[in-house]
Amino acid sequence: MPTISDRHDRFYNAVLAVNQMMVTVRDEHVLYRELCRVLVEDGGLVLVWVGRVDQASLQVKPICNFGAGGEFLNDVLISVDQEIPQGRGPTGVAWREGRPKVVNRYREEPAMLPWRDVAQRYGWRSSAAFPVFRQGKIEHILGLYHQEEDAFDDEVIRLVSALTQTVSFALENLDHESLRQDMEIQLRQVAQVYEFSSQPMLVLDESGRILSANHAYETMSGYPLDELAGRHPPVFDETFQFVLHARSGGLLANQNSWQGRVWGRRRNGDSFPQWMVINVVPKTEASAASFVATVTDMTDRMRFEDTIWRQANLDLLTGLPNRFLFHTRLTEEMVRARNHQDIFPLVLFIDIDQFKQVNEFMGHHTGDCLLMEIAGRIRGCAGERTLAARLGGDEFAVMFSAMSEAEQHKMAHSIGECLVKGLREPYELAGSERSLYMTTSVGIAMYPRDAGSTETLLQKAEQAMYAAKAAGRNQMVFYTRGMQEQAIERLNLLQDLRNALAEQQLFLEYQPIIRLKDGHLVKAEALLRWRNPRRGLVSPGEFIPLAEESGAIIAMGDWVFRTSADWVKQTLQRLGDEFQVSINMSPVQFRDPNVSVANWLQYLQAMGLESQHVVVEITEGLLMDASEEVSRKLLDFRNAGVQVALDDFGTGYSTLSYLRRFDIDYLKIDRVFVSSMTHNSSDAALVEAIVAMAHKLGLKVIAEGVETDIQHEMLRQIGCDYGQGFWYSRPLDEARFQQLSGRFPLQEDAA
Ligand code: C2E
Ligand code: MG
Ligand code: MG
């Protein structure tokens, strides 16, 4: 039988062993496991276990044990709930009261009743429970069992209590250790954020010298850290130095932060805009004040802003300033001119002659290439103090501020001449076999002679440009007062034209078309006439372009179609079933989606007129415009049986390939060829070739402008199908046409 002092000795040894062990253990679980083992093996206990209280159920869950009967812990209920018998054992008391609880006579103690059988089985005669504190709170309960009664005397209780205090201390140490490790990790993370952030950052000392730079800063600046350390950040301007110096003057000291744009310098010498935010890190007991600077490369941002500016101010195709920028700059110059009277601005308004045809005949891509080439040439004519711009479409403008009125005149002449001559040079465009020949009309207006404001100066230059066009294009024209009157007159004419239809000033004349083979009158062309009470008869050459520009042609064309149809219906009765009326149609009518071919066809149907009595005259330009709207309208006419004549053939591009693409029935050879064929043998040959070629393509030919019997005879011999011209008859109004029909068929001797 071991004596009490034996028992104490064993406990001393065990406590020493545990203390030693705890110096090295870094893990809570290992600590407890060793504690239990040493107490059993060295301390002579039967079973030692450590339990944790589950706050929800108040049950005590073993987290580790050593010795005989450990398995029982899984089967029995131990609680700290005072309300139940299993909660009133030593564990429950130790938990609730926060002090060791000893039961030295296990078998006699009523509180131990719930576990008496197990105790019997494993030979426990005494038991104790000790709370283990951590940071002032009970964390665990240490349960001890001994095979002797009265095993837990005061000395043992003192020893075990000391032991649990050591455990508490060890646990708290572990806590501190993990906290320290956490902080280290956090610090390392912060350092990593700094180091690996894509945001370039610098840490500067109080004098603004670099203490450290992160990787992103090194990449952005091109400087490795060892070159940066100890020097001021590589920037061009003084701003930054100023900010740093200002700190000693109290600026940053009060503000704690500063931000602004700074021109940075890369290692390769390039400058680049950067946005710098500098924060002051205040001085502490351990460290001096410092700055943390975050630096953002603004290059892309500035590029983006630059793009926005370009889009708003430059013409995207040619790169020239656009109308908006031109206007802004001209206004600035005009303000200066008015306020200081030391400059004399002038404007040249440039319009490319018949540019529309390039787009129509050769496609928009060629048109674009041509515009770029033109822009380059205009730039070439514009020297210093000159601004060239594209106002839109084929309109350009150049502005120059002269120092005197004498210089103003001189420069207007020289720039104007350069433009007219330079833009006349042939254009060799990539992808185009032929050289392109263009001409230009330039209008010039000068301040203060012609206008006092931006708007009027531009307007007058434009009027002068129109005058250049009217005078035959390919020239420059200076603005004169008379032009103003002409412009006003144009406006008045347009006003009158708008009322013409409603006021029944329009009427039609019909010009006979003769079949050359037998002299029969088989067709007539309807020609529009406008008689204004004040102006008298206005020629179609004057008012039709105006009607097209203003859109008035839509309503007028509709009226022409219906009136011609009515007329041919009546005329058929006199002139026979073959008779046709030929109606001129403007490209504007074909392109406008509001103009409906179906409406006209319905009209014909409603009045009982077969559509083969109507021929539509179109121009070459229209066929080059292969837009869906145009193609569909042509097809609608074709499908309904309305024939199509190509008017003024030979004056446009006369490309024959499109004749096959569209169903054309008649070719009308322009009168310039007909008039020259009698005295120019090559023109005669040309007409003959056109007729032969048209016949091969299955087209009939109408010669326009036949004025003499010789022309008539030549055309007849060539094999031309039809003739139209003053020699047969001038265009006639309805009544006179009726009288005329008796003249046909032409007698052979008339020819
Ligand atoms: P166009 O279609 O080529 O019409 C023929 C023009 O030649 C007419 O001029 C006619 O009077 C003229 N002409 C006829 N025979 C001779 C001749 O032997 N010698 C000369 N020197 N001229 C002759 P007009 O009536 O002045 O019409 C001019 C143009 O106006 C027409 O040319 C046509 O393009 C357009 N036009 C006329 N009426 C209409 C219309 O109702 N709608 C549209 N869109 N255009 C029309
Ligand atoms: Mg015609
Ligand atoms: Mg014609």
Image (cartoon, rainbow, N blue to C red):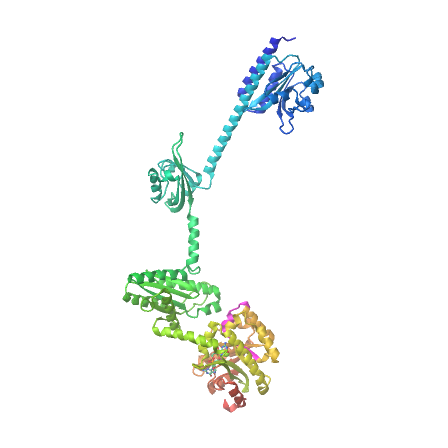
Front in this rendered view, residue 138 or 72: 138
x, y (%) of residue 64?
62, 23
Q: Is residue 429 visible?
A: no
Q: Is residue 169 above or below residue 435?
A: above
Q: Quadrant of the N terminus?
A: top right
Answer left or right for 741 relative to 331: right
Q: How many marks are shown on the rendered structure?
A: 0
x, y (%) of residue 614?
57, 79
> Within the image, what quadrant is residue 103 found in?
top right
Front in this rendered view, residue 40 or 110: 110
Front in this rendered view, residue 257 or 26: 257
Q: Is residue 59 visible?
A: yes
Q: Quick check: is 14 in the magenta stretch?
A: no
Q: Is residue 505 above or below residue 418?
A: below
In the rendered image, the residue lying farthest to the front is: 83
Answer left or right for 581 relative to 448: right
Front in this rendered view, residue 540 or 634: 540
> Within the image, what quadrant is residue 66 found in?
top right
> Within the image, what quadrant is residue 371 found in?
bottom left
x, y (%) of residue 578?
59, 83
Extent of the magenta region: 614-628
x, y (%) of residue 477?
35, 71
Q: Quick check: is 615 in the magenta stretch?
A: yes
Q: Is residue 741 above or below residue 545?
A: below
Answer left or right for 191 relative to 571: left
